[in-house]
Image (cartoon, grey):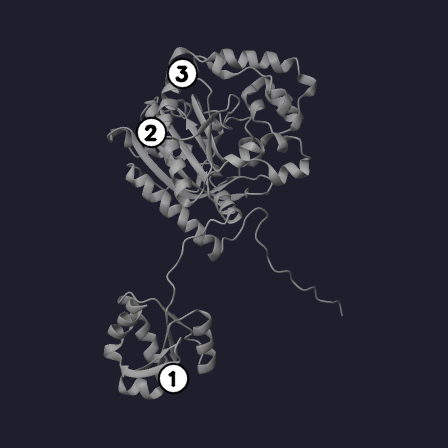
């Protein structure tokens, strides 16, 4: 008889990952700080669908962007619609702004969101194909103080989570008035260096020369050092805007570094762009550029947050002009760095009380007693599926419980309960009606 092949256990798709309770404690700490700070500054929550019309991303991200060319997950519905799993959060929020009539609200409208996004990119340190972000968007305002406010909130979230030595890398990439002249000069510069460009940059030179400044290939990084700078080509309006943003950052004592070659990966950005790194990462920049490809993959700079102004996005989507600015924080990246730097996750209440039962009647009484204690705000540990007294006491000791509440058949019938004081080894019997009072008095003394 032919041998039956053992079926292999189904694994998660490449680049997708489970987030277990340990990491979720880190995630909760980040999100609690992010929500609290955002709401204090007037931001309101929004949730957009995971699936959107693909055109929502094809237009504003740019057909030559990495995301559109290589990374976007798309599908055809039975009705023939081309949908995409959202690769980023800004375009969906802009769509929702117009679709839900937010233009009639007092402007600007401040929104924040959190959730999963999807890109079919190479999984590596801090990067996954399903990844989580916390994002902020301000729609309907062109004042430079809004750019500074977005940066400030990102800075505050990172600081209050526990990060130190945070540095904002910032640049202005101009607007549709002054950027074309700069692009022309950039193309002229790179045409003279064409043979030294990587394959991708050679292809992008004609359609999207700004993307060459974002290339991580060592040869292209070297060429960038002598490339023309946008800051020298800004029109008066963009210069004034950028100067004002920097003055607000100075006022807020937010450390920043002018990065004349910083660009963002999507076509809709204009004027202010920024990324936030740990300062130690900035110092490693030159050393990392000299490493091998394998080294670079493990040690390359990873932005903890990034964003910028996108006044042109709405018109690209076919709506009326709408000045806007926003940012996002990569949550898996933050968790990775929190672990590396020893930043503690969210703490959860210790179960200083452990409920133990012996016998069927006691188990039934325990089933309800747990809820009575929860309503009184007393965190309680239990192992209600176990029946052995010794096993339950061992678990209580391992969890660091100060009190063990022991219900036997007798106690279940006569309405009493044994309290064992784990540190002293002593125990006493009391009425169940006095239990809450006794526990609270004992824990208060401790």
Q: Which mark is residue 238?
A: 3
Q: Residue at x 62, y 16 (%)?
A: 190
Q: Is residue 308 left or right of residue 11?
A: left
Disc 3: CA contacts within 10 A as few (<14), some (14-19) or many (>=20): many
Disc 1: CA contacts within 10 A as few (<14), some (14-19) or many (>=20): few
> Of label 3 and label 1, which has the lower sequence position?
3
Closer to the eye: label 3 or 1? 3
Query: Cβ–Cβ below 8 Å for labels 1 and 2?
Result: no
Q: Is residue 185 left or right of residue 105?
A: right
Q: Residue at x 49, y 13 (%)?
A: 232
Mark 3–mark 1 Cα distance, whole angstroms, equals 76 Å
Which residue has dot 1 on it?
360
Percent x, y for residue 374? 30, 67
Q: Is residue 100 in view from this perspective?
A: yes
- Dot 1 falls on a residue whose secondary structure is helix
Which residue has dot 2 on it?
139
Q: Residue at x 51, y 46 (%)?
A: 341
Q: Is residue 94 in view from this perspective?
A: no
Percent x, y for residue 151? 39, 31
Q: Residue at x 56, y 32 (%)?
A: 283
Vertical position of residue 357 compared to residue 145: above or below: below
């Amino acid at each position: 008889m032919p041998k039956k092949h053992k079926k292999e256990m189904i694994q998660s798709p490449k680049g997708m990952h489970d987030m277990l309770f340990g990491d979720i404690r880190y995630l909760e700490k980040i999100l609690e700080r992010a929500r609290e700070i955002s709401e204090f500054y007037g931001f309101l929550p929004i949730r957009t669908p995971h699936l959107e019309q693909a055109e929502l991303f094809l237009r504003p991200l740019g057909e030559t962007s990495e995301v559109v060319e290589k990374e976007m997950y798309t599908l055809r519905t039975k009705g023939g619609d081309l949908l995409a799993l959202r690769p980023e959060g800004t375009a969906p929020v802009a769509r929702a702004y117009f679709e839900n009539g937010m233009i009639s609200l007092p402007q600007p409208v401040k929104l924040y969101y959190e959730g999963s996004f999807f890109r079919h990119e190479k999984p590596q340190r801090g990067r996954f194909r399903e990844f989580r972000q916390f994002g902020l968007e301000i729609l309907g305002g062109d004042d430079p103080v809004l750019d500074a406010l977005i940066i400030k909130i990102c800075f505050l979230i990172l600081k209050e989570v526990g990060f130190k030595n945070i540095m904002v890398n910032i640049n202005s990439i101009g607007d549709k008035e002054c950027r074309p002249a700069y692009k022309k000069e950039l193309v002229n510069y790179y045409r003279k260096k064409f043979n030294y460009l990587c394959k991708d940059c050679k292809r992008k030179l004609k359609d999207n020369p700004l993307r060459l400044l974002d290339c991580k290939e060592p040869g292209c990084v070297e060429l960038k050092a002598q490339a023309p700078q946008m800051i020298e080509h800004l029109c008066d309006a963009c210069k004034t805007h950028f100067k004002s943003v920097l003055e607000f950052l100075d006022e807020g004592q937010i450390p920043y570094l002018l990065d004349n070659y910083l660009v963002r990966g999507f076509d809709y950005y204009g004027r202010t762009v920024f990324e936030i790194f740990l300062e130690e990462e900035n110092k490693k920049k030159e050393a990392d550029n000299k490493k091998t490809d394998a080294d670079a993959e493990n040690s390359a700079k990873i932005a903890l947050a990034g964003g910028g102004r996108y006044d042109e996005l709405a018109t690209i989507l076919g709506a009326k002009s709408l000045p806007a600015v926003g940012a996002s924080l990569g949550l898996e990246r933050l968790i990775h760095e929190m672990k590396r730097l020893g930043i503690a996750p969210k703490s959860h209440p210790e179960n200083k009380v452990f409920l133990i039962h012996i016998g069927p009647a006691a188990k039934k009484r325990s089933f309800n007693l747990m809820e009575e204690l929860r309503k009184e705000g007393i965190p309680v540990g239990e192992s209600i599926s176990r029946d052995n007294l010794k096993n339950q006491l061992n678990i209580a000791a391992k969890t660091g419980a100060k009190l063990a509440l022991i219900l036997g058949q007798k106690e279940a019938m006569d309405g009493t309960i044994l309290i064992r004081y784990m540190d002293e080894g002593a125990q006493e019997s009391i009425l169940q009606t006095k239990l809450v009072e006794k526990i609270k008095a004992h824990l208060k003394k401790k």
